[in-house]
Each structure stands twice: as structure tokens, then as C-alpha cells.
Image (cartoon, rainbow, N blue to C red):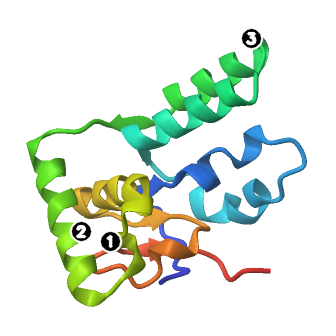
Amino acid sequence: MSTVRSRWPIVIDTDVFSADLVPGSRLAERYASLITGRPAFISFQTVAELRYGAIRRGWGHARMLRLEAKVQRVEVVHSGPELVAEYAQLRADCEAAGHALAQKAHTADRWIAATAIRLGIPLVSNDGIFRGAPGLQLETLPYG
């Protein structure tokens, strides 16, 4: 875990990436210092989670356009042989370490973590599941 505020590229997890799309969310404000001005990537899994959440909540046309515009401003990392290999290795490493990220319930989170590991850059997230994951550089803030 790190709170280093460099200008290096980052992968942004769904919780932080979507925060400013949720009325009243303070998460976007809290994480602005970690993400502002940095080249940003998101996983294909994050895009799927965002669109599913919007559909499930019945977002209107204008709000969906805001979501799509936000996605267009970052680089989406799609699955491929290298990412699949990283994902499999991450699950094995988490299993061996007894880390909860190995559990089936965290399949989506593993794709996001594997994306950051594959790119060799930190993941910015507020989700505690990533803490201590083998091989993952995590940038997060203390809860509060």
C-alpha cells in the first residue's frame, strides 16, 4: 500500500473511477489528488461493471452519455493472452498466500488487479480486497 502521489500512469478501480457519477459521493473528492493529471487506464471489467450498474439503476439517456464520455477519456485495457496469463498467475499466487482475492466471489476484482500487474503500474482503489495482494502495487487512502 502506498500513498505516493507521483504522476506515473495508474489503473483506476471501478469504485474510484465511478465516484463522481454518483450524486453526493465524497470518494471522488478524496481521491482527486491521487488521480488528477495522471495517465489513466481502466480494465474492460470496470467498463462492464459501470454499464451493468447504470442499466440496473435505470439511468436516463443524459447520465448514460456522461458515463460513456468518462470512459472515452481513459484507455480501456481489453483481455488478451498476456492478461489472461497474468490473471491465472494472480489467482494461483493469491490462493497460495491465502489471500481472499483468490475466492470465486472476487473474479471481477482479479481482472482489475491483473490489469495493473500486467501493465506494471499501480491500482488506485478504495476497496480493501486489494490490500496485500501478491504482486499488486496499490495506491489507496486511509479509511475515514
Residue carrying label 2: 91
- Give SS at disc 3: helix
Residue carrying label 1: 102
Q: Tell me the mark number nearer the camera, choosing from 1 and 3.
A: 1
Which residue shows up at 56% across the image and 49% down it? 14
| First in residue order: circle 1 vs circle 3 | 3
Q: Is residue 103 above or below residue 143?
A: above
Q: Residues within 10 Å of mark 1 (few under 14, many from 20)?
A: many
Name the residue type under label 3: His
Residue carrying label 3: 61
| First in residue order: circle 3 vs circle 2 | 3
In 3D space, how far apart are the residues under numbered discs 3 and 2 (Cα atoms)? 38 Å
| First in residue order: circle 2 vs circle 1 | 2
Name the residue type under label 1: Ala
Q: Are marks 2 and 1 in contact (CB under 8 Å)?
A: yes
Left or right: 101, with 142 as reference point: left
Q: Based on the displayed image, in which of its 4 quarters is residue 122 positioned?
A: bottom left
Name the residue type under label 2: Arg
Question: Where does residue 62 sit, x and y in percent of width and height?
Answer: 77, 14
Which residue shows up at 76% across the image and 22% down it? 59
Can residue 8 be seen here?
Answer: no
Front residue (pair 74, 55): 55
Left or right: 127, with 32 as reference point: left
Quadrant housing the C terminus: bottom right
